[in-house]
Image (tube, helix red, strand yellow):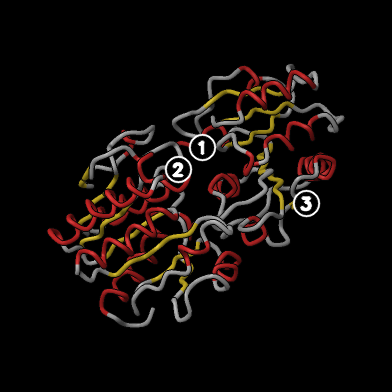
């Protein structure tokens, strides 16, 4: 197959990591993969797998945020589709999803389109999800709970397929055994780790507040960067938690931090299928997560500690329960690159052939 994967750009994000994992797995199995981006920039530009062709369509990714810039992006994408005629196009995030629908129509070609969705639909993007595709297209949800929410907003007759995220690369067990260079990993005090973009969606403000209610010895490291970093640091200072909470910034690889932690916390207000939680469960870590839409309930079931989103007192109690209990049992195989890409390949091939999946 020739599969084109369309992203705006390559920032340090979970969706982008998943798409690069998919690209890597498809290339390894012998498929041709072209990654289409506005420009080859961003923190993950260096992480494009070997064998993946990268095409910079031109223009800054920020141009997608205004109508004129989006129209130019659609036109450039249509020109490439007409010239190269891939078998399938996989897009991620709503602007790319909408652009691919428009570009395919403009180009007059007929690749199968897989529009992936990684978060519950909001009012602002429901209109894009409601655009009709073609009979063998798919809207891809990363969890069954998310698929049920999407069913209410997609165009009638649109096929929704749940496909797993390729979160865990082949060398994940070795990477998870590395110990980060941070003094708190050598201390006797238990250490909690939260990995994710520092943004309102991820709920780190609730976690910092929860640390005020945790009476037992515990330290917390927030791994990641984002727009809320300064506000979170100010919150840590305001609550007098400087000796218990540290923000370490972005890292190239969160697996060693997760694999070395005593507890992994996911305080999100919203998710799709959280990669950090998959990694924590695969590493056999104790975990506490919010029961936010969507993903944590599906991953944990009745095996782990789930708490109400946005409630620091409930989160503090959940932290205590998780530290006192055993790590949840978990089968990581569906979320490895090999396991997930095998399912993706089957879905892509059946759609290209026009058969049921």
Question: Mark 2 Cα within 10 Å, few/some/many (few <14, many 20+)?
Answer: some
Identify the residue at horizontal 32%, vertical 45% (top origin).
69
Earlier along the polypeptide chain: callout 2 or callout 3? 2
Q: CA distance from mark 1 to mark 3?
A: 26 Å
Question: Which quarter of the picture shows residue 163?
Answer: bottom left
Q: Position of residue 200 (x, y in %)?
A: 64, 40
Q: Which residue position is annotated with label 3?
A: 308
Q: Position of residue 223 (x, y in %)?
A: 57, 30
Q: Which residue position is annotated with label 2?
A: 172
Circles 2 and 3, Cβ within 8 Å, touching? The answer is no
Q: Position of residue 144 (x, y in %)?
A: 57, 68
Which disc, if any, is residue 255? 1
Above or below, 325 against 294 in this view is above
Above or below, 304 against 349 in this view is above
Question: Mark 3 Cα within 10 Å, few/some/many (few <14, many 20+)?
Answer: some
Question: Which quarter of the picture shows residue 319?
Answer: top right
Question: Mark 1 Cα within 10 Å, few/some/many (few <14, many 20+)?
Answer: many
Secondary structure, mark 3, is loop
Secondary structure, mark 1, is helix
Front-most of 137 and 319?
Answer: 137
Q: CA distance from mark 1 to mark 2?
A: 8 Å
Quadrant of image for the N terminus: bottom left
The reply, left or right, for residue 240 in relation to residue 69 is right
Earlier along the polypeptide chain: callout 1 or callout 2? 2
The reply, left or right, for residue 114 in relation to residue 283 is left
Secondary structure, mark 2, is helix
Q: Position of residue 335 (x, y in %)?
A: 48, 56
**In this view, the mark in front (1 or 2):** 1
Circles 1 and 3, Cβ within 8 Å, touching? The answer is no
């Amino acid at each position: 197959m020739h599969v084109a994967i369309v992203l705006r750009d390559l920032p340090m994000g979970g969706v982008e990591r998943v798409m690069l994992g998919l690209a890597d797995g498809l290339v390894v199995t012998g498929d041709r993969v072209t990654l289409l981006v506005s420009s080859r920039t961003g923190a993950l530009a260096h992480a494009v797998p070997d064998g993946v062709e990268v095409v910079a369509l031109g223009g800054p990714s920020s141009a997608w945020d205004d109508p004129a810039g989006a129209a130019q992006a659609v036109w450039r994408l249509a020109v490439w589709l007409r010239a190269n005629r891939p078998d399938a196009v996989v897009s991620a995030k709503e602007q790319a999803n909408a652009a691919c629908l428009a570009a395919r129509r403009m180009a007059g070609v007929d690749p199968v389109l897989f529009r992936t969705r990684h978060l519950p639909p909001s009012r602002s993007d429901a209109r894009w999800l409601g655009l009709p595709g073609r009979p063998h297209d798919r809207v891809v949800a990363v969890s069954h709970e998310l698929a049920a929410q999407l069913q209410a907003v997609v165009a009638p007759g649109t096929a929704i397929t749940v496909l797993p995220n390729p979160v865990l690369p082949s060398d994940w067990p070795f990477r998870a055994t590395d110990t980060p260079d941070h003094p708190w990993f050598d201390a006797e005090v238990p250490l909690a780790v939260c990995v994710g973009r520092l943004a309102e969606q991820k709920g780190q403000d609730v976690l910092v507040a929860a640390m005020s209610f945790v009476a037992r010895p515990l330290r917390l490291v927030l791994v990641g960067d984002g727009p809320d970093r300064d506000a979170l640091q100010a919150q840590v200072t305001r609550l007098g938690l400087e000796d218990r909470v540290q923000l370490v910034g972005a890292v190239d690889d969160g697996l060693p931090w997760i694999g070395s932690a005593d507890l992994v916390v996911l305080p999100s207000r919203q998710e799709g299928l959280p990669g950090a939680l998959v990694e924590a469960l695969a590493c056999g870590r104790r975990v506490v997560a919010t029961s936010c839409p969507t993903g944590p309930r599906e991953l944990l079931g009745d095996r782990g500690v789930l708490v109400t989103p946005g409630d620091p007192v409930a989160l503090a109690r959940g932290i205590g329960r998780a530290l006192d209990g055993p790590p949840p049992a978990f089968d990581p195989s569906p979320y490895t690159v090999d396991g997930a890409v095998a399912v993706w390949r089957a879905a892509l091939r059946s759609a290209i052939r026009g058969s049921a999946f």
